[in-house]
Amino acid sequence: MDLGFVWFAIIPILIVAFYLAYFLSYRLGNVLSQRLGRWNLHPERRLLPSAIVAVLFAGVAWILTNNHMLSVQPEAWPVAGQWKQNRLAVTPALTVPRYAHNLGGALVVTGLWIAAAGWWRRWRGVDPPEISAIIVRTGLWTAYPLIVAAALLGPVFLFSLPAEVRDALFRPHAYSVLWWLGLAAVAAQLALGFLALRQPQEFRWFGGLTAGVAVTLVGMLCGREQVRLAFLGREWIGFSLSAWAVHPQVSSLVLFAVLLVVALAASAWLLWISVRAPGAPLTLRSVGEPRPGA
């Protein structure tokens, strides 16, 4: 199978996954609007769509992780048109731990976004306090166990790396030093996350936890770059970027920039009309308050 087809398949996969997620949100209840969905009384009906959504999103994460691992291992690239190994599961001993670590980290950020939405809605007075508290706790209980899991998976991925690549992370390079800082922030997250769960009404714990995760994300990005350079710098593979012809494609970058501006403008416009709409969730109207004429 051509890798190009797999790469371009990301877009339709995401479209299907998001529409299925929207369908589930329509069929299930909504704690914000205090609405009971049709499938709340029939939980078996949501199992298959939920599983499909999870598999699709996890599949996209696998494609991205596998593609990156392939890009840093020239020894796995084709010679005379013949691939040396499975292109959809390159070096599983390396890719699987990295994939698990990536997925855990992504879900940590998801949990923090949920908790942040709860705090934002609380400050705006959109929901009754008990509703916003549920959102905050849901986000924290999503994030914290996965922080612990990611902290356990990190060493597994680290020791799955080749020795010469792993050693590069412990040398005093700029990227490595920032990676060390990201690791140090994990210890603070474990303590702050525990306090945030014990006292979810205290924003300082959530704020500290979010700041710690942000530091770790920057550190992981730097560590990722150091690992990439170390992979490509292994002497025995004989790889040199200067030996490859580079053909810049400016048109694709321009198209991306234009579409990004259009998407941001459309998002800002939708947010603006949502805020101005009578009885919209973003206004100060409480969920429990009846609308005029109701």
Image: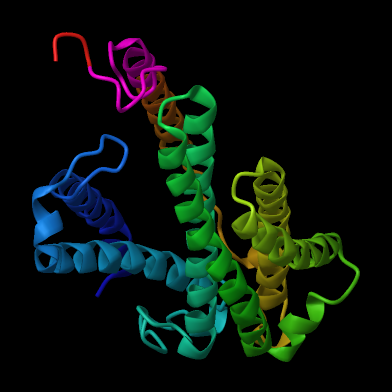
Tell me if 263 is positioned left or right of 73 in this view.
Answer: left
Of 232 and 175, the residue lying toward us:
175
The residue sitting at 24% across, 57% down in the picture is: 13
Q: Nearest the camera: 100 or 197?
A: 197
Asked where in the image residue 60 lies, by quadrant, the reply is bottom left
Quarter of the image containing the N terminus? bottom left
List the single residue furthest toward the right. 172
Q: Main secondary structure of the magenta part?
A: loop
Above or below for 157 versus 247: below
Residue 235 is situated, as x and y percent measured from the top left of the image, at: 74, 84
Residue 160 drawn at (x, y percent):
62, 88
Magenta residue check for 205:
no
Residue closer to the observer: 37 or 21? 37
Q: Quadrant of the C terminus?
A: top left
Left or right? Give the position of 219 relative to 104: right
What residue is shown at x 43% (from left), y 64% (from top)? Answer: 64
Residue stretch rendered in magenta on the structure = 269-290
Between 132 and 214, which is closer to the camera in this rendering?
Answer: 132
- Residue 21: horizontal and vertical position, in percent? 23, 51
Residue drawn where x is 47% and y is 35% of the image: 129
Query: Which residue: 17% across, 68% down?
Result: 47
Q: Measured from the top left, where is residue 214 in percent x and y?
A: 68, 50
